[in-house]
Amino acid sequence: MIVLGIETSCDETAAAVVAGAGEASTILSNRIASQVEIHARYGGIVPEVASRQHPLAIIPVIAGAMADAAVSWNGIDGVAVTVGPGLAGSLLTGVNTAKAISLARGLPLTGVNHLEGHIYASWLTGDRPVFPLVCLIVSGGHTDLVLMKGRGDYTRIGGTRDDAAGEAFDKAARMLGLGYPGGPVIQKAAAEAVTPVHLPRAWLKGTNDFSFSGLKTALLRLVEAGEVASPADAAAGFQEAVVDVLVTKTVAAAAEYRARQIILAGGVAANRRLRERLVAVSPLPVVIPEPALCTDNAAMIAACGGRRFESGLADGLDIDVLPGLRLAHGD
Ligand code: KG4
Ligand code: ZN
């Protein structure tokens, strides 16, 4: 099976062609048109600006993905597109383009949950799921701990009570004047630290939940009081506090649910320190997509879509965007 995947849930316009399905997929092409430079001047994503950029980029990005994969339209077996969660105006471009292709080429269509897509990124480079597994999805919009007992079987067992981890990175970077997006710039600054500051951790004991708002406020107080020797020391202390809590609680949740594998997914999973610590601390095998597949892309959407087609989960041309879509029951 060869699937064209389309992703426009936030600020990346992406298209990919993937062969195989679900947990046994191979990337034939993977194109992304990033809007990072456009949003950088505002210090964050401006939804209206994002939604206006997707229509400009979507057709060239799809044409590029088709050319890179060297497949003709006759070689495509289905179209998979992100339906949510995400920004409504952004999602609309991807969904309507996918519908148009489906109608014009007579191809089956399937709507993919962006969060499920992030999990499927784990299986694009050879790793295979071992159930039950616990997955930490950490992105700009989400921080969720999910128990996966089998294919398509998701239970949310914990998550953030306030900011998503990626959102916290973005806000901390803004406070420290390091730019946007926050994750990569904090990671880079942290590497230059001399004496990392110590910041508090919210453990929320007895739960599998997270909270990052207190950490953010603690950082702000230090900055306002002029107690930070350098942005690098603050960045390192902040990154360490986030990583410490994410790693410790994920490993504990995996033990509680007797998981056999841990998956780390979503944009923040690109963080080098988080990857290293989780692998070092976890007694279980850890699967993490390569950094370029952690951040938003369409290959993960195509892989997940392939699994949906195999399971008979094609959708009609009347599918809607679902900005508030959730992954699992339990929340
Ligand atoms: O999954 P993603 O690309 O988009 C969403 O679905 O939200 O995640 C984007 C988030 C941003 O908050 C960004 O700062 C963060 O992922 N991120 C990182 C790193 N690279 C991206 N956070 C920490 N370290 C990184 N290296
Ligand atoms: Zn994402």
Image (cartoon, rainbow, N blue to C red):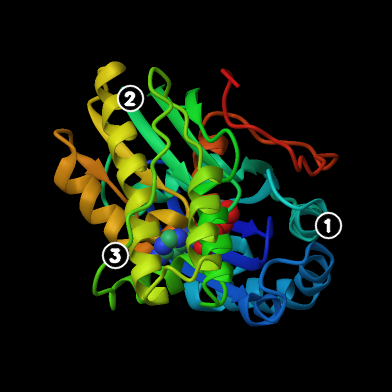
The residue tagged with tag 1: helix, strand or loop? helix
Instruction: Locate residue 254: give its quadrant.
Output: top left
Real-space Cα separation, disc 2 to disc 3, in angstroms: 28 Å
* Residue 212, placed above or below residue 148: below
Query: Sequence-wise, which precedes: disc 2 or disc 3?
Result: 3
Specify whether tag 2 is near ligand 1 (CB below 8 Å).
Answer: no
At x 73%, y 74%, the residue is 59
Residue 196: which numbered mark, if any?
Answer: 3
Amino acid type at circle 3 is: Pro
At x 50%, y 32%, the residue is 159
Whether residue 269 sits left or right of residue 66 in the image: it is left
Q: Nearer the viewer, mark 2 or mark 3?
A: 3
Across and down, in percent, residue 292 comes to 41, 66
Front residue (pair 181, 150):
181
Across and down, in percent, residue 147 comes to 41, 24
Q: Report the residue marked by disc 2.
A: 253
Instruction: Locate residue 170: give its quadrant.
Output: bottom right
Query: Sequence-wise, which precedes: disc 1 or disc 2?
Result: 1
Across and down, in percent, residue 289 comes to 34, 54
Amino acid type at circle 2 is: Ala
* Residue 316, placed above or below residue 227: above
Residue 89: which numbered mark, if any?
Answer: 1
* Residue 12, placed above or below residue 96: below
The residue tagged with tag 2: helix, strand or loop? helix
Q: Contact (CB < 8 A) between labels 2 and 3? A: no
Amino acid type at circle 1 is: Gly
